[in-house]
Each structure stands twice: as C-alpha cells, then as structure tokens.
Amino acid sequence: MSDKINNHYIFDKEDNSIIKSNFNNYLDWDKSCFDTVKEKIKKFLRSEQNNKCCYCKKELKFDLKDVDIEHIIPKSAYSKFTFHKYNLALSCPACNTIKGSKEVVKKIIVNYPRDSKNIKIIHSHFDNYSENIKIENDCVFIPLTKKGSETITVCELYRLITVEQKAKESLIKKSDGKLLRDALRLSKNDKMELINELLQRGLK
Ligand SMILES: [Zn+2]
C-alpha cells in the first residue's frame, strides 16, 4: 500500500520571489517574511499526509505550535535544501526536535536525491512507511527494515510507549474510582460481602 507523500508542494511565482529576495542560508528560515510561504506548505502537506506526523504517525493538531515543517535532510548541514520540494514534510514538534540535525544521509550528496537509497531513515516522499515500520496499539513501533529501525532510533519513537503507558495507568485509576463509588452506594451487608470477596481474591 502506498502511504508516502505522492505530491510535493509546488512553489508559485510569489513564493519564489520571496525566497529569491530573502533567502541566503538556512538561518533565514525563521524570518517572518517566509510565514505565508510556510502556511501554504503546511496547508498543502496536511492533506497529503492525512494530517499525520511523517515519523510517528500521530495526528497533527491545528495550533501553529503543534505542527512543524520538517527538513528531512537537515537544513543546517545542507542549507541549499532548505526550500527543496522533496525535503519538506510535516512532523509533530517532538519528532522534529528529537531528530534535530542528526545525520541521515549515508554519504555526502551534491544534488537532492531522487530516491531514498542513500537516506538512512524513512523519507516520506520516497518510502512507504508501512513497509518499514509496523505500529501496534498506536504506540509500539516495530521495525520491518533497517530504515525503519533507524527512524525509530533517530526520532526516539520508543518514547511513545511511556506516554501510552501513562495514559493507560490513568485510565485504570479512573475505573478504580468508579468501582469505589459504586461500592459506596451498596447496603451495609452488600458492602461486607464485597469486602469479603475482594479479600478472598487477594488471598488467592
Ligand atoms: Zn511525530
């Protein structure tokens, strides 16, 4: 099944002119003059990526701070790919921050690659995620390939297991609370019966 980004963002005349007049190197990325271009990229990629982070596949939220434009090949190492159509994908801020500027290319490249042969991690424009990683219970990431395994390491996707565990623990606590509330409504005799039953269970 294809689950890669099938269409890249197409920079229009206006975008190109803003980039041409304001971009010198990757440090310019944060300049406010690029805000509208970035908004257009986000809007386009959100639908291409079914609103999911390209690395952990969690749903992207809609607040500005809840989605990042991720540079698959780090822009700090390859400044000239900062606005490259194939280098942009949306990720959650956590994946983006953790991945940071870690090395993802196998050897020094001059031109932007046309496939992901020399990219260590899943490249969302070139690779199908599901061929490289299987996600179980929304939080367990099982590598199916070396690329999958590298992606899990680079983005520390195992961090999500802990998040999920915490969520489950809090759910258990909530259901315990309900049991307690129900028990308090019981008559005195039924309460004693329940206590005895719980004691018996505990003894087994
Ligand atoms: Zn993510």
Image (spheres, rainbow, N blue to C red):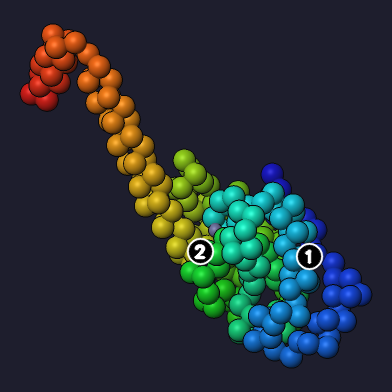
Q: Position of residue 53 (x, y in %)?
A: 60, 56
Q: Position of residue 150 (x, y in %)?
A: 50, 64
- Give the residue number, with chain letter if any, for mark 2: 94
Q: Which of the pair 30/116 is nearer the observer? A: 30
Q: Position of residue 90 (x, y in %)?
A: 65, 62
Q: CA distance from mark 2 to mark 1?
A: 22 Å
Asked whether mark 1 and ligand 1 are closer than 8 Å, the reply comes as no
Rendering quadrant holding ligand 1:
bottom right
Above-or-below relation of 114 to 182: below
Q: How many residues crowd around disc 2 within 10 Å: few (fewer than 14), some, or many (20 or more)?
A: some
Please, what secondary structure does the residue beneath circle 2 have?
helix
Specify the amino acid type for callout 2: Ala
Residue 197: quarter of image:
top left
Taking 178 as reference, is 81 left or right?
Answer: right
Specify the amino acid type for callout 1: Lys
Above-or-below relation of 93 to 79: above
Q: Quadrant of the N terminus?
A: top right
